[in-house]
Amino acid sequence: MKPHLSETVTVRLSGETKAKLNALAEHTRRTKSFLAGEAIEDYVERELAIVAGVQRGLDDMEAGRVTSHKDAMRRIKALIESAQKTR
């Protein structure tokens, strides 16, 4: 397995965000670079998961694996009514 190599990226932050990052770095005893890298990594993973979900939906639509709005609403209402009866 190859070692994890990092690369440098330059980002522009507002003064307010930079100050918050500085404060967080001091409180957590982490570097600003570490915190920024973690935040970007989390953001990218989350956004890629969203993109993948949208693509799955588009693939389902193209393959005809869809439910009409009318049928979906009927199912939702039935679930709500069932849940209300069990209270």
Image (spheres, rainbow, N blue to C red):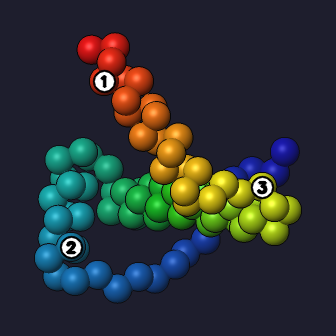
Secondary structure found at label 1? helix
Marks 1 and 2: CB-CB under 8 Å? no
Which residue type does callout 3 highlight?
Arg
Q: CA distance from mark 1 to mark 2?
A: 46 Å
Residue 38 visible in rendering: yes
Residue highlighted by disc 1:
84
Give whichever of discs 1 and 3 has the lower sequence position.
Answer: 3
Q: What x and y, as percent, mark residue 38?
A: 45, 55
What number is the disc on residue 17?
2
Q: Is residue 56 visible?
A: no
Q: Compared with residue 67, is residue 82 higher up or lower down, i.e. above or below? A: above
Residue 10 % position (x, y): 46, 82
Q: Residues within 10 Å of mark 1 (few under 14, many from 20)?
A: few
Q: Position of residue 84 (x, y in %)?
A: 30, 24
Question: Which residue sits furthest top?
Answer: 86
Residue 6, above or below 4: below
| Local crowd size for mark 3, using a 10 Å CA cut-off: few (<14), some (14–19), many (≥20) | few
In front: mark 1 or mark 3?
1
Contact flag, marks 1 and 3 (Cβ < 8 Å) = no
Task: Report the amino acid beneath label 1.
Answer: Gln
Measure the C-alpha gap from mark 1 to mark 3. 30 Å
Q: How many circles with numbers are drawn on the protein?
A: 3
Marks 2 and 3 sit apart, C-alpha to C-alpha, by 44 Å
Mark with earlier residue (2, 3)? 2
Q: Which residue is mark 3?
A: 65
Query: Which image quarter: residue 12?
Result: bottom left
Horizontal and vertical percent position of residue 81: 37, 29
Which residue corresponds to the image point at 32% horizontal and 50% vertical from the top-left?
30
Element type at mark 2: helix
Is the N terminus in the top left, top right, bottom left or bottom right quadrant? top right
Mark 2: amino acid: Thr
